Amino acid sequence: MPRPAGRGAASVTPAGRRMSPGRRRTVRPGSRLPRRPAWGMAVGALCVSASAVLLGLARTDPGTASFYRCVLALPALVALAVPERRRQGPPPRGQYGLALLAGAAFAWDMLLWTRAIAEVGAGLSTVLVNVQVVLVPLLAWAIDREPVPRSFPLRVPVILVGVVLTAGVVEGGAFGSDPRAGTLHAVLAAVCYSVFLFLLRRGGHSGFVRQRYVLVIACAAVVSLLAGRFSYGLDIAPGWKVMGWLLAVAVSSQVVGWLLVASASPRLSSHLGAVLLLLTPVGAVALGAVVLGERPTVLQLAGCVLILLSAYCAAAREIRPRRRPDRPSGADGSASGPEGTPD
């Protein structure tokens, strides 16, 4: 006779699997996340890196760029979310608030960072916004009590030096039309960027990654529309050339890049995800050299090497397979598994 469900009874997931009480799942059954999340995160960061070059080619207002890069991505994202909704159903109501807050933070990150590029230069704005490598693990530690490896604080100065060199600040990349306002906008963008990354990763623990991401981008589009209308500039009809570049940003960054990050980040620790996202300025330097003919200096190449080495060390340390401790053999001479079953 089936046992009635109660407070202490095991719950049953939509996939029909039983889950013991008190056990917290990090991925909802039926969600399709990358089998190698570190690789997914790295590829996503490199896809996002294309946005800097493509936005430079678009040459439009921050509000216009932020609005259209979200709106143009929505049809493809909705099409990708429909199969997930059929498999899993809609996300819980509690997920909507986190998704909308993440979308608002993402919109302000795009708006503030795009404005900071003109005010303080691409170099310093890139350095300031990438202090997320420190802020995201701090948010995860303060709110979720996620432990941070002891070696991480020692690696942070090396990582930041790599970002500074890659951005070209040492060689004069920190100049702009209004350095004080640009520094303030870049710092605010860094805070919004860190909140966005933290909420994107935190919400993904319960699954419904694609549906939540659609809400994030839709909210970012609305916020960008309002902010562009009243302060950051908005051109509803920017022309086919500009729309073409913004469509390229939408596909490479919003559809492919950030969706990969949203799918992979819940399966990685906060500090590893933050380090892997530093591949974004590295990819921007490489793409700028290929597309725009920009020749990176020796210091920029040295910074790229430092970031790549830091990302490799962090990823190798976390995903390296751990040796299983020796266990006493069973009665038949075979090693027993964690639950007494042969391996």
Image (cartoon, rainbow, N blue to C red):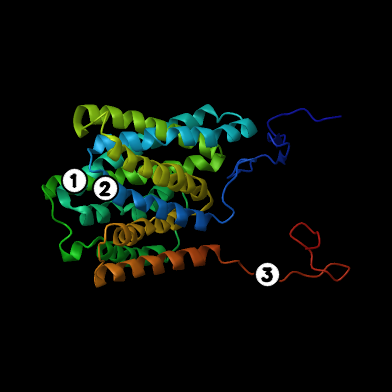
Classify 10 Å Cα crowding around label 2: few (below 14), some (14-19), many (20 and above).
Answer: some
10 Å crowding of disc 3: few (<14), some (14-19), many (20+):
few
Task: Locate the C terminus by quadrant.
Answer: bottom right
Tell me the residue at 49%/39% (across/down). 203
Q: Between residues 193 and 219, which one lies in front from this camera angle?
A: 219
Answer with mark 1 or mark 2, whichever residue precedes in sequence. Answer: 2
Percent of width and height locating residue 127: 26, 56
Q: Is residue 273 left or right of residue 222?
A: right
Disc 1: CA contacts within 10 A as few (<14), some (14-19) or many (>=20) = some
Left or right of residue 320: residue 252: left
318 vs 90, nearest the viewer: 90
Q: How many marks?
A: 3
Q: Secondary structure at mark 2?
A: helix
Name the image quarter holding residue 304.
Answer: bottom left
**Residue highlighted by disc 3:** 325
Return the disc, 1 or 3, that comes first in the chain's sequence.
1
Judged from the image, the secondary structure of the residue bearing numbered disc 1 is: helix
Horizontal side of residue 136 vs 25, given as left or right: left
Amino acid at dot 2: Leu
Residue holding disc 2: 57
Residue 165 in the image, given as x and y percentages of width and height: 25, 65
